Amino acid sequence: MSNIRVVSGKARGIRLKTVPGDTTRPIMDRVKENLFNILGQAYVLDAVWLDLFGGTGQVGIEALSRGAREVIFLDTARAAIQTIHANLAATRLADNAAVLRMDAFDYLQQTKKLFDVIFIAPPQYKRMWVDALLIVDRHADELLQSDGIVVVQIDPKEDEFLELQRLHQFDKRTYGNTLLSFYELAAL
């Protein structure tokens, strides 16, 4: 497993722990840097993020390091939750984070919190991104700020067209074996 680190912001350069085993797929630093370049400050500074399948927590931690107001991390695996806590402690960014060990799909259907960014990067090849995106689409008005976005990170081989009601894809970038898809609320 390659080393992962915080790319920019107040925790820049701090190395992050990875989740033991092969249940997570950490985003490469180069892809993470491109993601944040695409998002710009508008979706980071003072923004509220949901890191839906937290894994190492590195994307949400990157957002916090760059000035996000709050990040909620979700994962069901105990090892991932412990890794997120350890990484938040190492970066001293825990004050603006909540780490929840619960099912992402249940959370999406019951929370009443509005997010500026929902980041979906589930375990590979299980179509979990489809299920998560369809729930966000169905509950978009209860989950996303009016100018909020959803970012999906998957392997390009997993990509498929989805019939969405409230969200529309406005950008898509491929970096090797990583595809980033960007969605926003469609105009009514």
Image (tube, helix red, strand yellow):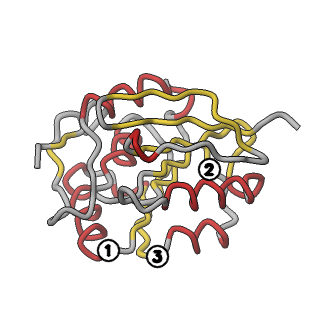
Q: Is residue 91 left or right of residue 112?
A: left
Of pointers 1 and 2, the one earlier in the residue sequence:
1
Query: Mark 1 Cα within 10 Å, few/some/many (few <14, many 20+)?
Result: some
- At horizontal 40% and vertical 43% (from top left) the residue drawn is 157
Residue 58, position in %: x, y?
Answer: 30, 48
- At horizontal 43% and vertical 44% (from top left) the residue drawn is 153
At label 2, which amino acid type do we have?
A: Phe
Q: Which residue is mark 1?
A: 77
Residue 134, position in %: x, y?
Answer: 65, 57
Q: Secondary structure at mark 1?
A: loop
Q: CA distance from mark 2 to mark 3?
A: 18 Å
Q: Is residue 164 left or right of residue 80?
A: right
Q: Which residue is mark 2?
A: 115
Query: Mark 2 Cα within 10 Å, few/some/many (few <14, many 20+)?
Result: many
How many labels sit on residues? 3
Q: Is residue 156 above or below residue 73?
A: above
Q: Which residue is mark 3?
A: 102
For the C terminus, the image quarter is top right
Of pointers 2 and 3, the one earlier in the residue sequence:
3
Q: Secondary structure at mark 2?
A: strand
The foreground one among 8 and 148 is: 148
Q: Is residue 170 above or below residue 78?
A: above
At label 1, which amino acid type do we have?
A: Ala
Query: Mark 3 Cα within 10 Å, few/some/many (few <14, many 20+)?
Result: some
Q: Is residue 43 left or right of residue 25?
A: right
Q: Are marks 1 and 2 in contact (CB under 8 Å)?
A: no
Q: CA distance from mark 1 to mark 2?
A: 23 Å
